[in-house]
Image: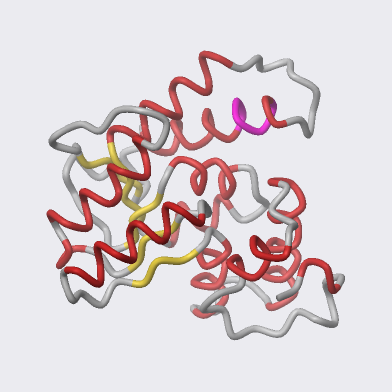
Amino acid sequence: MAGDDTRYPILVDTDTLIAVATSSLWAEITENIGLTTTNVCKQELERHVEETRETAPAGSRPYRLHHGSRTALEALADDDLPLTRVTSVPRPHGADAGEESLRQEVVQNPDAIDYVILMDAAGRRSIRRAVEDQDEDIRVLAPPFLFYILSDNDLISRREFCEACGELLEREGWTGYNAVKAAWEGIPIDCSDILDNDLLP
């Protein structure tokens, strides 16, 4: 970790970290993209590791939560990786505490943020309202946008990008119409020759 309270311009929530930590592109993301999360999201990751079994059936939600959270926590603890944690004050509580901590960070430190990445539709709406209220130019997008950043910087091929997006959507169960549409928002890459139509907007 580059040090507490170091802020990179991409703010990510718990579910985003879990989703990309279990992807084939995790090493590329953690080596090439500076990400910031919050102490609240870190505590959610720790709780997932404690409350789920390492031996849960492969592919199950408990398995993804455990292994994705543990992988993300290992990266947070690695001083050589550009993944940092900032402290939310006041500390949010409740089921949506992680998302609320991102919203607070947007309100308190908007100049430090270019992107907020989270999959939850209600969370994205809440953070977009905060962005609009402050008249800031912060984009609020879904986790596949991190893969697009790799692609846009020629760090992965178009095929690698498309396949990673398809795998993420299927693995996380983000396959409903609205989830798929949200996942591709802001991504100008055509994957129609690689992915099935039900994984495309």
Whether residue 61 sits left or right of residue 83 in the image: it is right
- Give the total number of marks visible in the rendering: 0
Dividing the picture into quadrants, the one containing residue 35 is bottom left
User: Residue 43: x percent and y percent?
Assistant: 36, 26
The answer to whether 121 is drawn above or below residue 87 in the figure is: below
User: Residue 109: x percent and y percent?
Assistant: 14, 58
Dividing the picture into quadrants, the one containing residue 53 is top right
Which quadrant is the C terminus positioned in?
Answer: bottom right
Whether residue 141 sits left or right of residue 136 in the image: it is right
Whether residue 40 sits left or right of residue 48 in the image: it is left
Residue displayed at 19% across by 38% down: 88
Whether residue 143 sits left or right of residue 112 in the image: it is right
Residue displayed at 34% across by 51% down: 82
Which quadrant is the N terminus positioned in?
Answer: top left
Query: 20 or 43: nearer the eye?
Result: 43
The answer to whether 182 is drawn above or below residue 92 in the figure is: below
Residue displayed at 67% across by 25% down: 62
User: Residue 96: x percent and y percent?
Assistant: 39, 37
The answer to whether 144 is drawn above or below residue 58 in the figure is: below
The answer to whether 127 is drawn above or below residue 75 in the figure is: below
User: Residue 155: x percent and y percent?
Assistant: 55, 72
Query: 88 or 163: nearer the eye?
Result: 88
Residue interval drawn in magenta: 63-67
